[in-house]
Amino acid sequence: MPCGDSGGRLFTPVDNNKVYMRPILSKEEADALIREIPEIGQLWVGNDKLREESYRNAMKSGDCREWIRIIKTLYLRKQQRIQQGKKTTAMDEKYLRLAEERLYSELSIPLGIPKEDMADYITEQIRASEPQQI
C-alpha cells in the first residue's frame, strides 16, 4: 500500500523484470543513512542536458544515497545562484523537490516522524553528531 494513502494500491506485472521493488529501510538503516549524509558527495555534471539525465537516472535508481547527492548538489547550486542574484532553474527546483519528497517519505516511515518534519530532524541529527568546538 502506498505510504500516506490508506486506500491506495500498487499494481505491477509479475512477469516484468523492469519493476524493482525493495523493502523500506529499517530504523537502524535510516539512522545510519542520516549519520552518513555529511560524507555523501554531490552529483555535479557541468553539461545541462547530461545533468538532467544524471538526475533522472539517480531518481529512478531507488537509492537514497543518490537522492541525497541530488539534494546536496541542488541546495548548494541554489545558494550560489542566489548569491549571484540569479533565480534557480525550473529543472533544479523540480529535481530538488522530487528528491526531497522521496527521501523524506522513505525515512519518515521507519523513524515514525511526519514527512514534513524530516528536514528539521535530519538537520538536528547531523548537528548533534558534529564534533563540538571549544
Image (cartoon, rainbow, N blue to C red):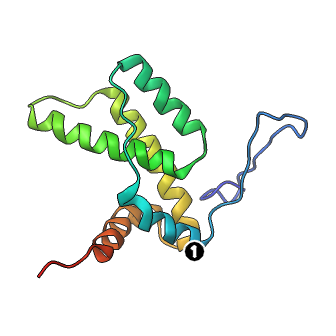
Q: In terms of secondary structure, where does tag 1 sit? A: helix
Where 122 sits versus 103, above or below?
A: below
* Residue for point 34% across, 35% down: 93
* Residue for point 39% across, 66% down: 117
Where 36 sits versus 127, above or below?
A: above
Residue 79 falls left or right of residue 96 = left
Q: Which residue is at the front of the view, 74 or 87? A: 74
* Residue for point 61% across, 45% down: 62
Q: Which residue is at the front of the view, 4 or 93? A: 93
Near mark 1 (Cα within 10 A), the count class, few <14, some 14-19 or many ≥20, is few
Tell me the quadrant of the picture where the N terminus can be found. Answer: bottom right
Tell me the quadrant of the picture where the C terminus can be found. Answer: bottom left
Where 54 sits versus 123, above or below?
A: above
Report the residue that reaches farthest toward the bottom. Answer: 134
Amino acid type for the residue under numbered disc 1: Glu
Q: Give the x, y percent position of residue 45.
A: 37, 28
Instruction: Please tell me in which quadrant of the rendered image residue 69 appears.
Output: top left
Instruction: Please tell me in which quadrant of the rendered image residue 129 appears.
Output: bottom left
Q: Give the x, y percent position of residue 126.
A: 33, 69
Residue 2 falls left or right of residue 47 = right
Q: Give the x, y percent position of residue 73.
A: 33, 41
Can you identify the residue that label 1 sits on?
Answer: 28
Q: Give the x, y percent position of residue 107.
A: 52, 63
